[in-house]
């Protein structure tokens, strides 16, 4: 058994709004630099993407796939949309299962248009799950709590949404705006494994692997991953890693035009119309979960692994240097210095010794240390606008800025240094 970091949700070039760099060799290369061992093949029902994947990925041994240069393992999978607009993640044992599922679904939606990487199907969640089971695959809801396309945006219960197939749901993907603490406030989620993954639309390491799941596996095959989800043996999912939910773009309820944030109570009083611009207030993940919560305080089933809040290294470097552009030469070359020294980004963030970090760059080392000590505050996201981390340099700074943020969810001047978003 070995531990693997898996990022099982991303998209290829044929899904909407995706970078033209989302191609197998680049994904594999960048995943390796991030410290991700295995990724989803993405969008496997799309014919052209399927051909691209089949050219770029080989079956190393029984059920274990990797790119041709063996930089990264791949798990055959896709995301689909059901007719209620909820998104679902699907994983399959191999390419022939993918072809089989494609045959079954081809009459229920356009699988091959230029932007159909994530197809919209004229089937409900239960019907999709039936088809996936017949193709010997597994399924679970994607970014389950987000407005618009999360299962909880359209249903009060995952079990009810999947009807007769509820027992065969293998996992729940949390999405960027939720973590285990929030998701486990809903009792039915205590019977599911949690998946954390990036939903990356570009291959760069502040996107790929920004959320990932660590599993103890014999090998990164579909069969082993399925075992980990289904918990038939010991605890095989050992860690969920993700952004703080406050960074998610739908964490708090907020106006989707001017992004003013509201408490659920205020929003109700205002009939979900923005006081400032009359735009619609979109209900945030935190408020949706509170509506559905069975528990008032954080509580978890015994098998639930720890959840670690992470930040992309490039964002930490950006904060250390106070630069505006994450793609600037200074940020990118410093990022490369660290990654070359420690092998990959996750090693830098989690494992490297402080003294060794100092040898590469002291300003960045200081911020990594603050990140590890939890001295990070967040201006929460909402209404489609990402939240913003503020990495403080001392406990005193953390405490004083926290107080301002807690008093006013719209506090834009959290005193002192500028936030990442303000540079
Ligand atoms: Zn989705
Ligand atoms: Zn507004």
Image (cartoon, grey):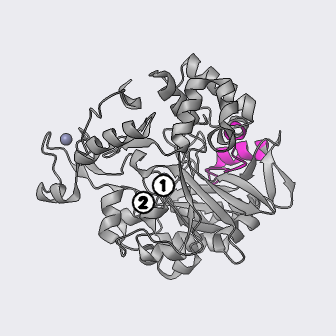
> Relative to 350, is 79 on the left or the right?
left
- Residue 363, image x, y percentages: 55, 25
61 relative to 123, above or below: above
Q: Quadrant of the N terminus?
A: bottom right
Magenta residue span: 31-56
Which quarter of the picture shows residue 96? bottom right
Which quarter of the picture shows residue 183? bottom left
Find numbered disc 1 in the image and state the secondary structure of the residue it sits on.
Answer: loop
Is residue 136 visible in the rendered structure shown here?
A: no
Could you say which is closer to the camera, residue 60 or residue 380?
Answer: 380
* Lower sequence index among marks 1 and 2: 2
Query: Could you tell me which residue is drawn at 32 percent across and 62 percent down?
Result: 288
Mark 1 and 2 residues: CB-CB less than 8 Å, in contact? yes
- The residue sitting at the front extreme is 396
- Residue 168, image x, y percentages: 58, 77
- Residue 18, image x, y percentages: 53, 38
Q: Which residue is mark 2?
A: 150
Residue 175 tag number: 1
Query: Could you tell me which residue is drawn at 55 percent across and 62 percent down?
Result: 107
Q: What whole-number distance in Å separates the C-alpha atoms at marks 1 and 2?
A: 9 Å
Report if residue 34 lies within the magenta region.
yes
Find numbered disc 2 in the image and state the secondary structure of the residue it sits on.
Answer: loop
Which quarter of the picture shows residue 421? top left
Could you say which is closer to the camera, residue 46 or residue 248?
Answer: 248
């Amino acid at each position: 058994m070995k531990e693997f970091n898996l990022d099982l949700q991303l998209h290829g070039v044929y899904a909407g709004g995706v970078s033209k760099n989302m191609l197998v060799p680049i994904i594999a290369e960048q995943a390796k630099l991030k410290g991700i061992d295995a990724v989803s093949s993405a969008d496997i029902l799309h014919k052209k993407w399927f051909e691209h994947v089949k050219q770029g990925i080989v079956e190393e041994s029984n059920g274990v796939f990797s790119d041709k240069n063996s930089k990264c393992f791949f798990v055959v999978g896709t995301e689909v949309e059901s007719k209620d607009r909820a998104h679902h993640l699907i994983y399959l044992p191999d390419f022939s299962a993918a072809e089989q599922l494609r045959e079954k679904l081809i009459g229920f939606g356009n699988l091959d248009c230029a932007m159909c990487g994530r197809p919209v199907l004229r089937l409900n969640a239960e019907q999709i799950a039936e088809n996936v089971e017949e193709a010997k695959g597994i399924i679970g809801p994607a970014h389950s709590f987000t407005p618009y396309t999360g299962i909880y945006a359209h249903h009060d219960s995952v079990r009810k949404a999947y009807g007769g197939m509820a027992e065969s749901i293998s996992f729940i993907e949390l999405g960027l705006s939720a973590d285990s603490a929030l998701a486990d406030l809903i009792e039915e989620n205590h019977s599911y494994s949690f998946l954390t993954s990036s939903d990356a639309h570009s291959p760069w390491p502040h996107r790929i692997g920004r959320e990932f799941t660590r599993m103890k596996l014999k090998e990164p095959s579909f069969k082993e991953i399925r075992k980990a989800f289904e918990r038939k043996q010991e605890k095989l999912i050992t860690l969920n890693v993700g952004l703080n939910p406050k960074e998610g773009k739908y964490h708090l309820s907020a106006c989707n035009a001017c992004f003013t944030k509201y408490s659920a109570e205020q929003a109700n009083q205002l009939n979900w119309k923005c006081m400032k611009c009359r735009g619609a207030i979109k209900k945030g993940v935190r408020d949706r979960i509170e509506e559905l919560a069975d528990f008032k305080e954080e509580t978890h089933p015994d098998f639930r692994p720890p959840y670690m809040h992470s930040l992309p290294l490039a964002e930490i470097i950006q904060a250390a240097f106070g630069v505006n552009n994450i793609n600037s030469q200074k940020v990118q070359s410093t990022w490369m210095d660290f990654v070359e020294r420690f092998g990959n980004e996750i090693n830098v963030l989690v494992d490297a010794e402080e003294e060794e970090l100092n040898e590469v760059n002291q300003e960045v080392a200081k911020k990594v240390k603050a990140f590890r000590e939890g001295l990070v505050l967040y201006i929460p996201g909402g209404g489609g606008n990402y939240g913003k981390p503020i990495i403080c340099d001392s406990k005193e700074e953390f405490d004083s800025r926290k107080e301002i943020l807690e008093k006013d969810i719209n506090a834009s001047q959290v005193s002192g240094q500028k936030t990442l978003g303000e540079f």
